[in-house]
Image (cartoon, rainbow, N blue to C red):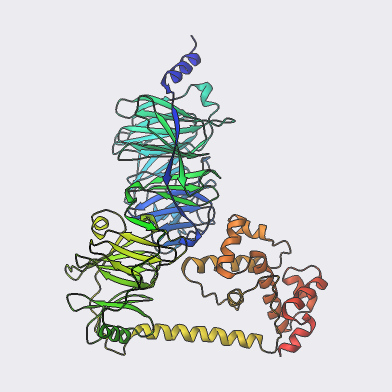
Amino acid sequence: MTRRIFFIILILLLSVATTITARDIPVIGIDMRDGLIESRIRGLCEISPGRTGILTAGSVTVTDGITFNSYTPDLNSGIHLPGYDGGVALYSDGKNLLWIKKGGNLYGFNILTGKSLPDPLKALGKGLESEEWSNFFIDSSHRTWVITLAGDIFLGNDGKNKRIGKLPGGKRVLEQLVATDSSAIFCYRQGYIDVIDIESGELQYGGAAFSPAQADSLTKNISVALRGDSLYIAHDYNGISKGTISIFNLKRHNWERSISVPFHINALAVSPTDGSVYAAGDRLAHITPLAQKPEVEYLEPKQTDLSSGQLSSLLIDSKGGLWIGAVENGLFYHNPEREGYFTSSPQRFNFGKQTVFSSPEIREIAMAAAPGITNCALELNDSSIYVGTRHGLLVVDRDTVIRKRLTDRLTHSGDNIQSLVIDMDGDLWLIFTTRIGCLSTSSDMGQQRLTIYGKLDGIDLDGKEFLPGEILMDSCGIIHVGFPGGTYSFSPDKIKNGSIGTSLTMTEEAQTIQEGDNSFIIQWLILSLALLGIILLELSDRKGRPIRPSGADGKSKRLEALLASGEEKIISVDEQFLSRIRNIVDENLRDENLTVQRLSELMAMDRTVLYRRMQALTGASPSTYIKTRRMKVAARLLTEGKYPVATVAEMVGFSNPRYFSKVFKDTYGTPPNLYSEKSE
């Protein structure tokens, strides 16, 4: 019997037949309405409990489950990894740095500054300056691992890098690394693993789960997960829809079993609590590998189509939530622990509209504290008056002295507070437009904790908002909140005893701001003056010009404001997105071939996703935006009078001056050769 036949028989003996079933699971879809900047997910990592990093085709997003902050990494600064031939990966140092492995390079990104690291090598500490790297990893303990072209292994921790040994893999292609406290496991594309003692650098085990004949048919981009003493490795096969999950016992140094599944596997995750295995690729599956006859369940998400495209990545976070990234159609979240905390009923709120002020006197005090932006107010047992506004929460006394502000830094986005209610424990519940918060009113050294519950906790309004005044706590302590088309109900006791939500502690000192000294008014005055300035500039720019709206192009007032001299007034993630769109269009304005397809490539976004996002933010399609921007710049150039019409046409991407003149006249109602005269 040859060695090859022996290995084939061994694998067949290890392989276990599986039973395949299907099961519906509640999965929450996360899209651009929630703040996700694009839908092509490439990688996921947990930054810290409650914070998740998301890598898309062209951006990095950090979310705490409530807000999504997106950034565009600078791909011109990085460390070249000449020996790396694997897929895209996202790592976190457990603090504020994200590391992206992509296209043979390593990039560092600081989520506090929102900028790429100009010198990633410096951030990794000393001892690596003279080395030529081959690969890079960060393990679950947030230690960094650098593999050099010479095969040397460097372990980094707290800015110090120590050489622990040499990689024995030879010419094998290293794809993944996981580590325990004492051992590092190097996983190769060909199905081999090496287990190395971290302290001594000695090889503890080296072997393969596959025969050489099988190894030749394996693809790259293997997936690895670690739970206790068990190592899970998922491989794919070339040319056939098949994946294999091999399980290695790190304590006994032996391969326990191999499970075959009839679909491609791109990502693998193992639950740290019950050992459930999730595999994603062509399908999403749940596997019970420890049973005598492992069962493979295809998970069919309720009301969410995961089967229409490839899945790229999986992550099980510290709160037991399963994050699912799709190659093309977005991000999904599943957490059975959060089911049932908030229940939605299609029956509309039928308790009658409640007053948003606890008394006429409280209403007068609230209106005086924050005139023009107050939505609701009530008084607590300590005589403090809590005022819900369009920009957060105020705590005032009966003399209208503002004692505390719980604003943007606490509520994540300064959302409207629509209603307030006190539960049976005396805690205050805040109803924002799309989420619900609980402010613990028990004070400990001046601290108050606000826990916010959103979409990941089961509150999914499908783009709708909670309605002001439609809130009631019944005699059982259940709180009911109305929204268009239904009612959300929840038990405060059940939720507070759980481990869901995103919590922050507020420790601001009391502020003695007298009546009339309201910074809210000042902020709104500044904003109003800024908006007035924009309007005056736009009116001045249009003076003397007959502007004919182009219905065919679908231009809106919002698009016109967006294109007016760079005054984009969209906030947060939208502002970053629109700023990036405008910069790319301006940089390529002279290019006649700047089409929607080309713009989607430059934005690293799917064309359909780009179209939908542009429509949502500007009321116009990408093609309309490009065309309107060309005309806006052309009008400015013609007004300056420095260039003839033919030159201006070329400068804004028109090779045919006659066609340019037609488009310009359709836009402004005046031929370009007469435009400068009319604008004077």
* 532 relative position to 627: left or right: left
x, y percent for residue 320: 33, 47
The residue closer to the viewer here, 538 or 583, is 538
* Residue 672 sits in quarter: bottom right
Residue 426 seen from this side = yes
* 87 relative position to 675: left or right: left
x, y percent for residue 471: 33, 69
* 632 relative position to 55: left or right: right
Count of numbered badges drawn on the protein: 0
* 612 relative position to 343: left or right: right
Q: Residue furthest top?
A: 1
Seen at 51% across and 41% down, the residue is: 84
Q: Residue furthest right?
A: 658
x, y percent for residue 35: 47, 61
The residue closer to the viewer here, 406 or 356, is 356
Residue 92 seen from this side = no
The residue closer to the viewer here, 207 or 552, is 552
For the C terminus, give its image quadrant.
bottom right
| As drawn, 396 above or below 574 | below
* Residue 345 sits in quarter: bottom left
| As drawn, 305 above or below 290 | below
* Residue 270 sits in quarter: top left
| As drawn, 272 above or below 211 | below
| As drawn, 429 above or below 300 | below
x, y percent for residue 53: 42, 54
